Amino acid sequence: MKKLTFSLFATAMALGAFQAHAADPVTLQLKWVTQSQFAGYYVAKEKGFYEDEGLDVTIKPGGPDIAPEQVIAGGGADVIVDWMGGALAARDKGVGLVNIAQPFKKAGMELVCPKDGPIKSEADFKGHTLGVWFFGNEYPFYAWMNKLGYSTEGGADGVTVLKQSFDVQPLIQKQADCISVMTYNEYWQLIDAGYKPDDLIVFNYTAMGNDLLEDGLYAMEDKLKDPAFEDKMVRFVRASMKGWKYATEHPDEAAEIVVENGGQDENHQKRMMGEVAKLIDNADGKLIEAAYDRTAKALLDQKIITKEPSGAWTSAITDKAIK
């Protein structure tokens, strides 16, 4: 009986010690499918950076039918990757999203047109069909058209907007005169389809000063009021940015990790990682306030949001993470 009692006591003590040191769970919802666009998070998990911070992170891939804002509002994630346009639009509707870190310092969005087509400059857009993705990705495009003074309702003095599929077929099949691409993804799909760089006219949002913030990390405002949750997000951001730093310094290895987690076509993922690295900059995750102001103003000008956003981002998490 003494042996049994001691055994039960030892088991209970071991279980208590395990529970005391159990990692804090965090669920991350991505904006799109598994690819090098999100390499930093997969690297942080694979390399044990999250584990080092006492975290057990679950990474949920996105897709065309998954809206990260809805997922987190419904309690399906603790933190999401989202574009600022979609996050501010959701906040305007009552979803208390707060930007807690901004891994992507630059935008990867571009509009590309065949050089042998009718469009040579912005002045040629009138009366033509331009492709853009929706689900929150259309906001930078509409902000640009609004800045140029073009109606997006079609007609001779405006542009016709094609709700673009998540591939380059609308250009190949001549359904649109220009289509939207990301520097790290669809642009290279066009190259793989037989286009040469010299065959394309590229309007890069960042180069034109029309970029809106992409791929930030967002958590719910009410949860951030809990010191324990805030501390968990500090650790999550610190580990994630360590993952991004490693990914930018070891792009091929990062791409291989992405493929091991479900990413398609290793060569494509390696090329994508090389392009994504250009958008990360110094991997500190800090938001550039001027870029936020530009994004918010563009959404206000288009009436996508009805009022000046307040409390939509915080530097508290990255400040503590960097310390």
Image (spheres, helix red, strand yellow):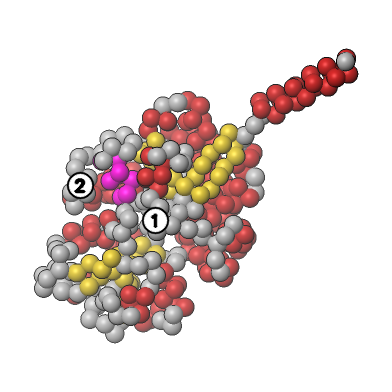
Q: What residue is at 19 percent from the left and 52 percent from the top?
A: 302
Above or below, 7 against 178 in this view is above
Left or right of residue 281: residue 299: left
Frontmost residue, 11 versus 113? 11
**Residue 290 shows in this picture:** no
Which of the 4 image quarters holds residue 157?
bottom left
Q: Residues within 10 Å of mark 1 (few under 14, many from 20)?
A: few
Please give left or right for residue 296 compared with residue 184 in the image.
Answer: left
**Magenta residue check for 260:** no
> Where does label 1 land, which residue?
65
What residue occupies the far bottom of the structure in this picture?
116
Please say if 116 is above or below 303: below
- Where residue 240 appears, as percent x and y from the top left, is 54, 45
Residue of label 2: 300
**Residue at the image position 37 percent from the left and 75 percent from the top:** 169
Q: Residue at x 51, y 60 (%)?
A: 35
Q: Position of residue 8 (x, y in %)?
A: 79, 21
From the image, give the main secondary structure of the stretch colored magenta.
helix
Tell me the SS state at disc 1.
loop
Q: Nearer the viewer, mark 1 or mark 2?
A: 1
Q: What are the residue bounds of the magenta stretch?
A: 85-92
Mark 1 to mark 2: distance in Å? 26 Å
